Image: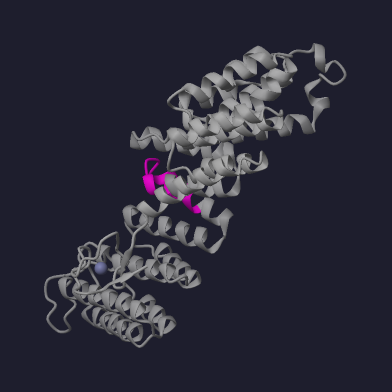
Amino acid sequence: MKLANLIGWSALALTVGAVLFRAGYRIGRDKSGLLAGAQGGASGSQRQVDTTFYFRGVHFLLSDEPDKAIEAFTQAVRINSETVEIYLSLGNLFRARGEVGRAIRIHQNIIARPDLSDQNRTAALFALAEDYRQGGFLDRAVDAYRRVLAVDPTHRKALSGLQALHESEGRWDLALEVLRTLKRVSGQSDPRREAHLLLRAGLEQRETDKAKPEASGREGTRESAGPPLSLEPFLAAIRVYPGCVEAYRLLGEAQMERGDIPAAIKHFSTVRKTRPSHFFLLVGALQKAYTLSKDEKGFHRLMNEAVSSSSASPRLILCWGNILEGQGRQEEAIQLLRRGVALHPGSTHLAHRLILFLRRQQRLEEALEVTDRCLDLLTSRQPVFQCAQCGFKSQDISWKCPQCQMWDTMEPL
Ligand SMILES: [Zn+2]
């Protein structure tokens, strides 16, 4: 048995012991109806039998015979709020070990008990849903989560489990619906997730509509019959999360499809303000839109403005540099990359590209100079020593590691 498992089982065995003790499961000393509330009229001999099974269960757990342990626990007839905790923990422990079949057996066994409070039944159903999810029985997991929610519609963990499940199944509309319920119940929102779910649901809807053109009654007259695809999901995603780059991209693409190029350009460009770090992702789309509107100059103006701003990312500069080079405007590309390297001296990508451009131009002296500067900077930031004990890195040697406090563990890199 692995040490971690042993610790897990021991902890459970201790819990079982403590609960049994607390519940007064001491053979021969029971006078006060200790399990009152569960089975008020249970006889002394029945309790004794149950106790025996519990102790046998603990024994089997510690001897790494989980199936026998489960058998012994389930033979203990009565169950109350405290013993339910043991069963639930036992099942959860099996699930955590990846033994989903055993976890399911235990949790099903709890649910089958007739003498169970609503609260305990819900807890067991939720645990069962988690078992099914981990075991890949997705339909059953959905069903179990829904049963939990039928009893307690505000059960956050069930909502969150069901939401994750719908997402992993690619049921975007359902995932969105549950996410919104979760938001209402918890008061906490997750705008990035909501925005992307809106997009996925919107795209899925579009595919469905495409697959059945005859149903829409627009076939043959599509061009004159109004908008072929709704912009609403994309607009909704932007309303929820204004930094959603993908929403702007899809919105612009859809507008281009409709022939509304100015609107597409407007939306692609908005990302410069709402998410400047990711603006470079839309450069290709913008180039296409400007080309369609036969406004190359407009595109150049926009890009020049974007790369000159203080928020221009290294990626954006690279992007524009590549376009310039592709158009044979070598000198402009090199000047741009020089400015980029000055602005982002730590960006090896920019330095690398500048060196390549210079070499292609046979400007080897300049290339060498940039290479030197880049390497100088990199080496000045490079750690020289590393602690063999904890991995702490430093440029100076410390005879006592400041992180793990061990003496003389720093080795040169
Ligand atoms: Zn250390």
Quadrant position of residue 186: top left
286 left or right of 60 in image: right
Q: Residue at x 22, y 74 (%)?
A: 408
Colour mode of the rendering: one colour
Q: Residue 169's spot in the image, x, y percent?
A: 59, 49
Q: Residue at x 54, y 36 (%)?
A: 315
Image quadrant where one finds the N terminus: bottom left
Q: Residue 101's spot in the image, x, y percent?
A: 50, 71
Q: How many marks?
A: 0
Q: Residue at x 62, y 39 (%)?
A: 357
* Residue 42 can be seen, yes or no: yes
Image quadrant where one finds the C terminus: bottom left
234 left or right of 381 in image: right
Which residue lies most toward the bottom here? 63
Quadrant position of residue 387: bottom left
Quarter, ligand 1? bottom left
Question: Over which residues does the magenta segment extend?
Answer: 144-158
Q: Residue 152's spot in the image, x, y percent?
A: 38, 44
Q: What secondary structure do most residues of the magenta stretch adopt? A: helix
Q: Residue 175's spot in the image, x, y percent?
A: 53, 40
Q: Is residue 302 above or below residue 110?
A: above
Which residue lies most toward the front here? 365
Closest to the observer: 156 or 311?
311
Closest to the observer: 176 or 350?
350
Q: Is residue 67 above or below residue 139?
A: below
* Residue 180 can be seen, yes or no: no
Which residue lies most toward the right here? 220
Magenta segment: does it hold 243?
no
Quadrant position of residue 342: top left
Q: Residue at x 41, y 38 (%)?
A: 182
